[in-house]
Image (tube, helix red, strand yellow):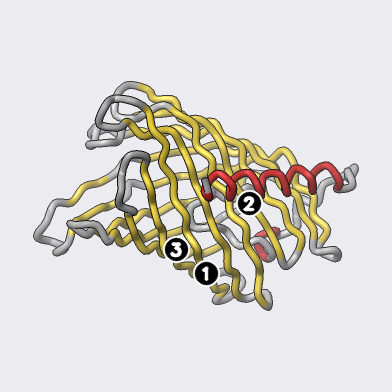
């Protein structure tokens, strides 16, 4: 229930801001929105930029594991951009002596439909659409080929901001479960250097032991530090819950961003 509320509330706030905001004849594409809206660890940003990311997830399950995932973002024009998720590396502890795997590759094409920004008032509204394709040549366990159309958004009322994404995953072959997903966060900037936010995700892509479809999701409070105009460091603690499971899965996430 809390995950659903965390999804519905920021979406409603975003829609109300979009409804009340003045419509500009010319959008301010050159406004660097991520100077005010800090990217959430688990949400694709709706602004277009040239940047690179390294994500790290340390799972506290038994056996515990470490996952490293690199990502590249590219901006071709004011409205067209791309995303490239390179294969992630996962290994159980102790590293080097336990099982390890490589994940699939994903490529997405982004179209920015709305980018209204007024830095003087500390306000901005963004809406971007993306189609992402995932390819797994080795057909790794739990991974396969899929196509996921989604919409991403962000709303800024400095120092407060919200962002999110919602879409549908369609399998292409085996290894991926069809279903919807939604992810959103509510955050606050602190002195323009730090940011805190609470991220929540939910989807219906869980197949339970009885073969029926179930819900799953997570909450992740996180804090970020703008080390410089080009570098961003973030860390969060994720609590993941699945329908029918009595235990909560915990993991620590880290993100390092370099903007080019």
Q: Is residue 260 visible?
A: no
> In terms of depth relative to the viewer, which is nearer, 30 or 8?
8
**Are the residues at dot 1 and dot 2 in contact (C-beta closer than 8 Å)?**
no
On the rendered structure, is 64 left or right of 198?
left
**Are the residues at dot 3 and dot 1 in contact (C-beta closer than 8 Å)?**
no
> In terms of depth relative to the viewer, which is nearer, 124 or 208?
208
Residue under circle 1?
223
Residue under circle 3?
255
Q: Nearer the viewer, mark 3 or mark 1?
A: 1
Question: Up-down: is 90 above or below 95?
Answer: above
> In terms of depth relative to the viewer, which is nearer, 213 or 195?
213
Residue under circle 2?
163
Question: Up-down: is 110 above or below 223?
Answer: above
Return the x and y of residue 78 as percentages of the image width and height.
71, 45
- Distance from disc 3 to disc 2, alpha carbons, whole Å, reads 17 Å
Q: Secondary structure at mark 2?
A: strand
Question: Up-down: is 99 above or below 181?
Answer: below
Q: Residue at x 50, y 65 (%)?
A: 222
Label 1: how many residues lie within 10 Å, few (<14), some (14-19) or many (20+)?
A: many
Q: Residue at x 32, y 21 (%)?
A: 173
Question: In what quadrant of the picture does the C terminus appear?
Answer: bottom right
> In terms of depth relative to the viewer, which is nearer, 215 or 165?
215
- Distance from disc 3 to disc 1, alpha carbons, whole Å, reads 10 Å
Please state the total of marks drawn on the protein image: 3
Q: Is residue 34 visible?
A: yes
> Could you tell which of marks 1 and 2 lies nearer the N-terminus?
2
Q: Secondary structure at mark 1?
A: strand
Q: Residue at x 63, y 49 (%)?
A: 48
Return the x and y of residue 255 as percentages of the image width and height.
44, 63
Looking at this view, name the residue that lies furthest to the left: 97
- Distance from disc 1 to disc 2, alpha carbons, whole Å, reads 15 Å
């Amino acid at each position: 229930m809390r995950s659903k509320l965390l999804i519905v509330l920021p979406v409603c706030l975003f829609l109300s801001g979009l409804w009340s905001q003045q419509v500009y004849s010319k959008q301010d594409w050159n406004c660097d929105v991520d100077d005010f809206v800090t990217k959430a660890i688990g949400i694709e940003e709706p602004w277009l930029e040239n940047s690179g990311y390294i994500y790290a997830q340390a799972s506290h399950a038994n056996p515990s594991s470490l996952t490293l995932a690199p990502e590249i973002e590219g901006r071709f024009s004011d409205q067209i951009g791309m995303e490239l998720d390179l294969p992630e590396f996962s290994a159980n502890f102790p590293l080097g002596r336990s099982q390890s795997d490589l994940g699939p590759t994903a490529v997405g094409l982004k179209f920015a439909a709305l980018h209204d920004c007024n830095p003087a008032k500390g306000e901005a509204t963004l809406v971007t659409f993306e189609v992402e394709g995932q390819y797994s040549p080795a057909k790794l366990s739990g991974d396969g080929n899929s196509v996921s159309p989604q919409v991403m958004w962000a709303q800024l009322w400095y120092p407060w901001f919200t962002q999110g994404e919602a879409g549908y995953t369609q399998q292409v072959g085996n290894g991926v479960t069809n279903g919807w997903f939604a992810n959103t966060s509510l955050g606050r900037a602190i002195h323009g250097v730090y940011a805190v936010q609470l991220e929540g995700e939910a989807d219906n892509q869980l197949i339970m032991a009885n073969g029926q479809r179930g819900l799953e999701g997570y909450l992740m409070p996180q804090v970020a530090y703008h080390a410089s105009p080009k570098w961003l460091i973030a860390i969060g603690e994720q609590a993941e819950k699945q329908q029918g499971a009595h235990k909560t899965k915990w993991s620590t996430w880290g993100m390092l961003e370099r903007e080019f």
